[in-house]
Amino acid sequence: MKWRDPLLLIVVLLLLWQALYFFAGDIALSSPLATMRRLAQMLGDPRFVPHVLETLSAFLQAFVLAVLLGLAIGIALGAHRLTGEVAEPILVALYSIPKVTLYPIILLIFGIGMPAKVAFGTIQGVVPVALFTMNAIRNVNPVFNRTARVQNLSSIAWIRDVLVPATLPEIVTGIRVGFSLALIGTLLGEMFGAQRGLGFLLMQAMSLHNMPNIMAVTLLLVLFAAIVNTALLGIDRRLRRRSGAA
Amino acid sequence: MLPLEGQRSGDSRKRGGPFMTRVAVLRLSVIAAGFALLELLCRTGIIPAFTFPPPSSIVVSALNILASGRYASDMQVTLGNVAASIASAMIVGIVAAIVVHALPAVRRVLEPLFGTYYAIPMFAFYPLLIVLFGLGNLPQVAIGFLLGVMAVVINTLNGLDRVPHVFDKVAHVLRLDPTAAAWRIRLPYASPYVFTGFKLAVAYSFVGVIGAEFITSSKGVGYQIAFAYNNFDNNTMYALIALVLTIVIAVNMMLHAWERRLLARRQR
């Protein structure tokens, strides 16, 4: 029963896709079945796999950096009230500017290649992790801290038994948003200036008007993003339920 | 790209208080110090001028560009596309939210999509959109729309969920038809949430349109930035980037002020 609604959604989306294909035809897009076949064929192609690995490696580096940096910034700003108040609107402003415009600057600093992609993914992903972490730490119920003090908890015990459980759900949400943004950043980086990776393949397929390839790569990316996000969402919900019940 | 729910900032400014609080003064000084440091690093050559020109000279070339009107038509194209994508995202988003809110079964099926939507790298669809819509303004507007619309839907639904049951009874007593009830009672009640969706739609539309112009297009500010980059024309590139960021930050601040006034009026 739990899987009925998501399955229904997938079926509806596939039907819409098929309908769009009937309506727009081969020039505009390829059918779901043809796209899946092409994707399977590509995944078996030894020339395709290095591009996937390239993107995956750039994305993972960017994601790890974004999470680590975001946690560090968020903890620093969350721990000190005044610093946090001074920095929050600046972070929010950084969050809502179109960071794509900064891409040429990143390229000038890092040159075309892996470091630029990683940097771009990182600057996209770092802000939400920092914002959510800061808010999580700020919003820890003061009663918890007072209780910890009354019980004479050591700092390690306080971090392990109070701070981490109280802030984790919010931080996981930040990491989930950061995940999507780091992926988008990495891909945008590859689309704008790269010689390898899935974003590059997309641009190449676009200039060659190779619809089946565009659709297959897009499908691969969407599947990857949707699966990881669903997993993170599951963790997120479980943590929230637990902290809500506690 | 932004949190889906609006966040109340921890700003301690109150109505009727001093014009600027200590926090605001500190914040401005931090920003000013950042620019001063950057200027110093550039002027002393620690940051090479080719990588990053000093902020003051970026400002000068930005003002020159504004005065010359050289990129006025590109600005118009970009801002027009952003406006079109905000408008379409708002209209479609609000209508969709009202419809979905009225149909709980449909909503339950769509729920996984709401959670996953922003994980999907929307720019991956850009090549597809170019093939579908051609090389005019439509693909850029479509990307901005696709990015923005879900934020409007999610926030409007969130607001509609909070309408007290008694309001529905009032609508029933007044014999309002469903459209009138949505338009005159539920939507006004949900307006702060819709406004959060609006703010996100504005931010996303800028990201979508400019990002799309970057990747492939033949006009617009994003295109001109990419063009300047490809021609090693750093002065123009940095000036245009600075102009775009200034416009976006100004728009965001205006929306923030507007939202505060709306919320203040509600609390009276």
Image (spheres, coloured by chain):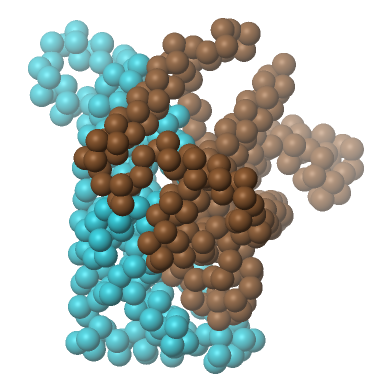
Q: Is residue A36 visible?
A: no
Identify the residue at horizontal 25%, vertical 83% (top origin): A48
Q: Is residue B176 visible?
A: yes
**Chain that the image shows in cyan:** A
- Relative to residue B255, is residue A14 drawn left or right? left
Work out whether B237 lies above or below A85.
Answer: below
Image position, residue A242 (x, y; %): 31, 37
Q: Residue at x 51, y 77 (%)?
A: B128
Q: Residue B179: percent from the left, percent from the top?
A: 82, 50
Q: Quadrant of the C terminus of chain B?
A: top right
Would residue B91 be found to the left or right of residue B193 on screen? right
Q: Colour of chain B?
A: brown
Q: Which picture quadrant has residue A103?
A: bottom left
Relative image position of residue A109 (x, y in whole percent):
27, 53
Q: Which residue is found at the position 22% from the left and 31% from the top? A: A164
In x, y percent, where is residue B48? 26, 47
A82 vs B136: above or below: above
Q: Quadrant of residue A197?
A: bottom left
From the viewer's perspective, is residue B251 above or below residue B262? below
Left or right placement of residue A36 versus residue B70 in this view: left
- Please tell me which residue is depicted at 22% across the width and 70% down the height of the picture: A54
